[in-house]
Image (cartoon, rainbow, N blue to C red):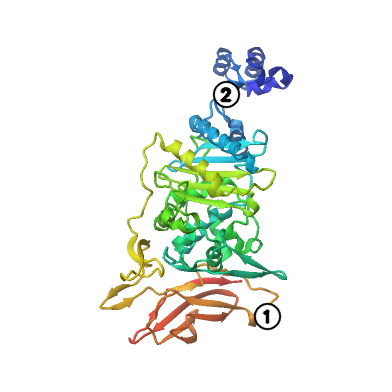
Amino acid sequence: MMALAVLIRAPSRLDLHKGVIKIEAPIARLAKLALKANVITQIDYEAILKTPLQIRASHLPIQAAHFVNYVSQTNQALEKTSGRLHTTLDGNIQQKVQTILDQRVQDLKHKKVNNGAVLVVDNKTRQILAWVNAGKFSSNQIDAVTTPRQPGSTLKPFLYALALKNSWTAASLIDDSPLAQAVGTGLHSFRNYSRHHYGPIRMRDALGNSLNIPAIRAIKSLGVANFLQTLHRLGFTSLTAHYDYYGEGLALGNGAVTLLELVQAYTSLANQGNFSALKVLANARSSKTRHIFSPEITSIIADILSDSDARRLEFGVSALLRLPVQTAVKTGTSNDYRDAWAVGFNSNYTVGVWLGNLDQQPMLQVSGSSGSALVLRAVFNELNRYNKTRALYLSPKLVQMQICRKTGELATGNCPSRMEWFIPGTEPATVIENKPIKKIYLTQPSPGLQIAMDPRIPDENEAFALRLSNTDLQAKKIEWLMDGKVIATSSAKQRQLLWNLELGTHTAQAKIWSDSDAPFTTASVRFYVK
């Protein structure tokens, strides 16, 4: 602060680029006045006089102006702080990551990439170790780490974590077929990045290959409001609009978020589903922890994101995304190649990378997997160089079973198969006395779902589909219950019922009648209509 106070009168004399700067005398005079006014102590005064101040710009160890600005803006208590202030930034890591990012931005200039940013976090302490900007505008007030941008597919892991929370499994089949919906007077067609469709596909492959259409079908089932609420709990404060504003496109990243928010949320996945704000001050107290997902859910998501086999349909055998140490990696690309993202975590660190242009100009076909992934890989290689690494956490409560790749059902020996992890109670059929026993549950509504009635549509014409899980039912009939009362009866083949919406809080169930005297009743699901 003393140095800053004496720079104001003639800043041109103290140009950092002109060599050595000596400003001891002005600082000494200011220190004497501060002592006289009781702003500093005698000990502080003597320390200032004994410390020569020589600054040479070329010898500054790291560039961290944006990080310092963020610390000062978000920590009002700094104004009352005396003495040294210890931040979490690691100078060695900051410098090496800066070099990596500067080189990558330079290499991609012919692809119209002018800016980039990287954030590195220690998973255990949640401390920010590197906060790096590079490229055009990087030296002024525009900080790409805190500038909201469209995240592309990087939000999908949180969508599928929410699906697992609602009794889906990594083997659940999602329809990847052409999908379109009305928008105004027109029709919007959703498509995958490769424009290919794969038909019914397991959730593991839908997430691993970052397919768009299964993500849209997932958010349709889970509810946009439910997903947005989950993102808010994960710290995405930039998503301030009503869920109707984003619509189902939220699953594809149509709402702008910051790199800081994204890395913070991924750090929660790395910490078994527990959210806590990232730290910038070494001695700062940890913020209150919020439990978002179970360790079993985050274990499955991490396993999928580190599974090269799950990416094979869209990414082939890309070596960039297959790191030497087990690392969960997700890439994302926004519309018109304006943003390219790569986020990942291993047992020690979470790293986020953004490439693009701060003036909003599109790049020349630079995607997260082709542009940002190389930076992510290089940063992790540097981080792992001097640190002991281990495999990602895998909950011991998970159940592993052999399933058919095509159907997601228990493997019978007559189909291509693979091992899959399941949360206890969601695993596929086991065989007891040659009779299939399967967990049957309501896939729609999902717990906590909020349904908004449309005032433009007559109430009697508004309906919502109650759906049972996709399983072979050996049953005579199905009774559908709403708020404990039977509202309809259907055949075993009809696993869906349209229910006329009614305002209020409701609970849905289904009873499956088979040859036995007692029916099987699904778990009660509470949801809301407003």
Residue 281 location, x and y as percent? 52, 35
Local secondary structure at mark 1: loop
Mark 2: amino acid: Leu
Q: Residue furthest left?
A: 433
Specify whether 175 is left or right of 35.
left
- The x and y percentages for residue 43 are 54, 17
Task: Verify CB contact (< 8 Å) between mark 2 and mark 1.
Answer: no
Q: Is residue 159 above or below residue 460?
A: above
Residue neighbourhood size for the residue with mark 2, other residues' Cα within 10 Å, grouped as few (<14), some (14–19), many (≥20)? few
The amino acid pointed to by label 1 is Pro
Q: Nearer the viewer, residue 509 or 318?
A: 318
User: Which residue is nearer to you in this view: 405 or 489?
Assistant: 405
Instruction: Describe the element under mark 2 as helix, strand or loop.
Output: loop
Q: How many marks?
A: 2
Residue with the mark numbered 1: 458
Which of the two labelled residues, at mark 2 and mark 1, occupies the earlier sequence position?
2
Q: Which residue is mark 2?
A: 60
* Picture disc at residue 269: none
| Residue 307 visible somewhere in the drawing | no
